[in-house]
Amino acid sequence: MESLKGRDLLSMADLSGAELSGIVKMAIELKTGKIDPRTRKNLGLLFTKASTRTRVSFTAAMYQLGGQVIDLNPNSTQIGRGEPLQDTARVLDRYLDILAIRTFNQQDLELFAVNAKMPIINALTDLEHPCQVLADLQTIYEYFGTCQGLKLAYCGDGNNMAHSLLIGGALVGMDVAVAAPAGFAPATQIVAQAEKIAQGTKAKITITEDPAAAVRGANIVYTDVWASMGQEAEAIDRIPLFMPYQVNRQLMSLADAKSIVLHCLPAHREEEITEEVLEGDRSKVWDQAENRLHAQKALIVALLGL
Ligand code: CP
Ligand code: NVA
């Protein structure tokens, strides 16, 4: 994975299909103990939104590698008092070896990347959540032995998760069908990007308002919250609009008989997914959550060139 050394992961599209598959395979080798790299480097975590999985899995991954983690709470740094991001990025670059950022605007992340030489990782923005998709693809690969040629159906909001799944799926040759209500489709530039990648990998990208059409024959059924962080005020009004997209027993009956269910978590039971499906046999969400640890450890190893 020499090609990834020193690079940033701002978007899923920053990786080639081979690099993405390489990270997934390395994550499995780390998980099974086949490889056990070590470092004494520092990882910074700069999160302006809440996080359980991403924060704790990055921290545990870095500690398991032998490195250190520095938690940069915006409220206890000068960022919260308005110090320009360009200045913060240049200063942090002198202390840290790698930095994961969770924030609202993708442009803020890009500003950090331009002003810091160390690898910058997108730990979720309003536009994308590529670290989650590394773990998702690992989970799919572990279960099916491949990602290529499968069909993933995503039902719900055309949000950051939908975006990174569209690009990640296209990169590994997996069909991705997104079903979202009118006005909540994925961003057109992301769909265009995914379609362009899909042409080269023979994957099919489908955007529809019909959840049944998306889920029919799917190997993986995926959902996420209907209102993301920062959209809390809209959450109640969205419920009736999104209810036809709920992942429940009836919708699952249209998927392939051996299909699995994934959710990035946190889940809102009886909204985007029923308790029965989330806790049912086909749900692999706990393995998926565990894989955040292994996939991000692989990402750190690749970007630091360990
Ligand atoms: N899936 C995910 O990113 O979870 P957290 O918000 O808890 O990090
Ligand atoms: N779409 C969700 C994902 C949370 C992991 C959000 O941005 O809040």
Image (spheres, rainbow, N blue to C red):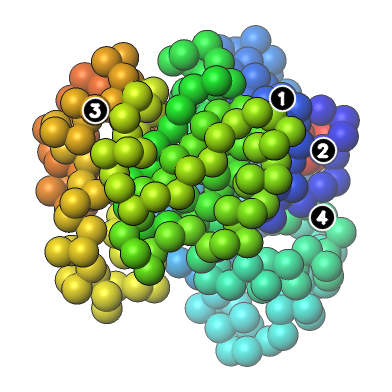
Distance (Cα) linking label 3 and label 4: 46 Å
Q: Say if residue 187 shows up in the picture.
A: yes
Distance (Cα) linking label 3 and label 2: 40 Å
Which residue is under mark 2?
Answer: 4
| Residue 99 sits above or below residue 165 on the image | below
Amino acid under disc 3: Leu
Amino acid under disc 2: Leu
- Of pointers 3 and 1, the one earlier in the residue sequence: 1
- Of pointers 3 and 4, the one earlier in the residue sequence: 4
| Mark 1 residue element | helix
- Neighbours of disc 1 within 10 Å: few (<14), some (14-19), many (20+): some
The nearer-to-camera label among 4 and 2 is 2
Q: Name the residue located 53 percent from the left edge and 71 percent from the top edge.
A: 104
Which residue is under mark 4?
Answer: 118
Q: Name the residue located 68 percent from the left edge and 67 percent from the top edge.
A: 109
The nearer-to-camera label among 3 and 1 is 3
Q: Name the residue located 51 percent from the left edge and 78 percent from the top edge.
A: 75
- Asked whether the beta carbons under mark 4 and mark 2 sit within 8 Å of each other, the answer is no
- Of pointers 2 and 1, the one earlier in the residue sequence: 2
Which residue is under mark 1?
Answer: 22
| Mark 3 residue element | loop
- Asked whether the beta carbons under mark 2 and mark 1 sit within 8 Å of each other, the answer is yes
Q: Residue 254: which disc? A: 3
Mark 3 CB lies closer than 8 A to ligand 2: no
- Of pointers 4 and 2, the one earlier in the residue sequence: 2
Figure quadrant of residue 1 = top right
